[in-house]
Image (spheres, helix red, strand yellow):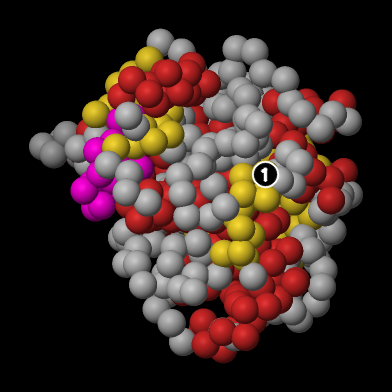
Amino acid sequence: MNHFVSHLEASIDGTVLPFGQLVNLYNGRPIWVRYDLQRVKAAVAWADIARRPPTLWRYRELLPLPQDQEPVTLGEGFTPLLPGPRLGRQLGLSQLFIKDESQLPTGSFKSRGMTAAISMAKWLGVKRVALPTAGNAGGAAAAYAARAGIECFVFMPHDTPLVNQFEARLYGAKAFRVNGLINDCGQIVRAGVDRMGWFDLSTLKEPYRLEGKKTMGLEIAEQMDGVLPDVIFYPTGGGTGLIGMWKAFQELAALGWLRQPKFPRLIACQPEGCAPIVRAYERGERFAELFPNACTVASGLRVPVAVGDFLMLDAIRASGGQAVVGREDRIAAWMQRASAAEGINICPETAVCLDVLEQLIHRGDVQPDERIVVFNTAAAPKYLEAMPGELPTLDKDRIDWSAIASFH
Ligand SMILES: *Cc1c(COP(=O)(O)O)cnc(C)c1O
């Protein structure tokens, strides 16, 4: 056999499903990829992986694409886990790390999911894909589809950041704005499956974007030398990253590849303008209701309803973590403060995490010496709308030195 997948599994009831054909949901809910971990363990060790090229495809045995298939890749993955000493000191933390996903192809971590999903779609003979997007997924899907020679249709809310509109079209996707939110765009995609003959690439509505996003957890384990951090702050929208990392940690534990069998507390961070998972978490519910009138500048988190809600809530609770809202009116200030402190361009979604981090420090839910990882999920320059205005202007013929000297 040229892959290590044992089967697919329905997340809602454990039904075993065959691998090697196109699937979306089962009973309206996501599908897991399961591996034969004994065979993986016999085939490869951490030391082998460490010698491979620094992309997420180094975890080949824990990814679904058969070994004899070339992945559709732009060299994505293995992003740096950067210490944040200055910001850490300001917050009273001694071990703050930022997993900098802003450096990935298309400027967000959506490329992780898309390299896996588009590689699998290509292998399974798909000629045409479609997806709804809050922004970054559309650009990433368009880029990887272009690379695979697959036709791509993208549907996004009418007020999606301009850069996301531009990039989807730049990579040749057939991109549309819709007078609604991402779930309304999802309805169009679902309605077009038969009519247009496309494959639905929506978040968690096919099994492989999750596997790509899972590599964030594998990378953290490798970069922290087999000892996972104490706490992870993750900006949570559809939840693929959160669910994927939790899956990665279970797989690593089952493989015996962790030096300490201790998992991080997962902190799901959502902006107050769109916080369906926080609301369900606080109410003790396993499924989340649609969050009405979703509105936030952290556009990647504008996901009012998620098909993987229960998988997120299960993972958050199992980890001993929590789901917490960040304040909308602090997003711009956190972007500025953290970027200036560390030289890392911090996106609005990550700004939400930083606001939550500060709250948890004040509450005593995070200790000063804990090892903390915050995900920076996209590049801040993609968010022109979040810019605080234009720079002050100088006249080259009459330079105003007092303006320069008193700049603040
Ligand atoms: C999509 C997105 C998220 C949310 O990711 P999920 O794994 O789907 O929850 C967070 N930040 C940015 C920048 C995004 O584009």
Is there any visible trace of residue 131 in the rendered image? yes
The question of residue 21 being in magenta is answered with: no
Q: Nearer the viewer, residue 277 or 196?
A: 196
The residue closer to the viewer here, 199 or 89, is 199
Please state if 205 lies on the left or on the right of 92 as rendered.
Answer: left
- x, y percent for residue 375: 58, 53
Q: Residue at x 63, y 24 (%)?
A: 305
- Judging depth in this view, the residue of 408 and 242 nearest the camera is 242
Q: Secondary structure at mark 1?
A: strand
Taking 288 as reference, is 88 above or below it? Answer: below
Q: Which residues are magenta?
A: 141-154
Report the side of 313 relative to 160 (left or right): right
Residue that badge 1 annotates: 10
Say which residue appears at 36% left-offset and 72% top-offset: 68
Picture residue at 61% right of the left edge, 23% below the top: 304
The magenta stretch spans residue 148: yes
